[in-house]
Amino acid sequence: ELCALRVEDVDLAGALVRVRQSVWHGKIQTVKSLKGNREFAISPELAKHLREYLKTWRPNQLNLLFATQNGTPWDANLLRKRKFHPLLKRLGIPRCGFHAFRHGNSTLLDQLHVPMKLRQERLGHSDARVTMGYTHLVGEDDRKLAAQLGKLLSVAPKLKATGLVPAAQSPWIQ
């Protein structure tokens, strides 16, 4: 989708991006589904960065935000092989594809407790199960949950002591 982004798809004043098309093997096409056509907010930092980028942007026939020197769409496969994988190697990061950014985005949205509907909209998914399939557990999540459960359940002895909750009716209170 990034490879097919046109200048007019970016609203810097409103800090919005509109996804209307994608690129497959260097050819522009429609997005995979109706939900793939979407609009979402971008951060003020990204809007500022894009403003600076547009000062050096070279117009092309398709008005693509990112294009080859010939003005054609980037081919994501070539970009991944020629630029992304060498960068990952230099940084000591295991090799992956661009799809990892979608998984990372979904996981970060989960960490921020973003409502599922908003996650689906941003990722262009119509099915929440697909969105959840993109979401990965972060090791610290389990520890945070255990600490929260500990705090929640530690009030149980206090309730028992007050007589508000009889022990016989609450098997989780010991």
Image: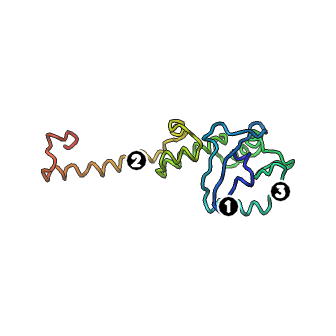
Amino acid beneath label 2: Arg
User: Considering only order in the chain, which callout, 2 or 3, is on the residue closer to the N terminus?
Assistant: 3
Q: Which label sits in the foreground, 3 or 2?
A: 3
Residue at 67% x, 61% y is 12
**Looking at the image, residue 105 lies above or below residue 48:** above
Type of amino acid under label 1 = Leu
Which residue position holds label 3? 58
Q: Secondary structure at mark 2?
A: helix
Alpha-carbon neighbours of circle 2 within 10 Å: few (<14), some, or many (≥20)? few
Residue drawn at (47%, 45%) of the image: 139
Residue name at image x 80 percent, y 58 percent:
57
Across and down, in percent, residue 146 comes to: 36, 46
Mark number for residue 12?
Answer: 1
Real-space Cα separation, disc 3 to disc 2, in angstroms: 49 Å
Please name the residue that numbered disc 2 is placed on. Answer: 143
Mark sitting earlier along the chain (1/3): 1
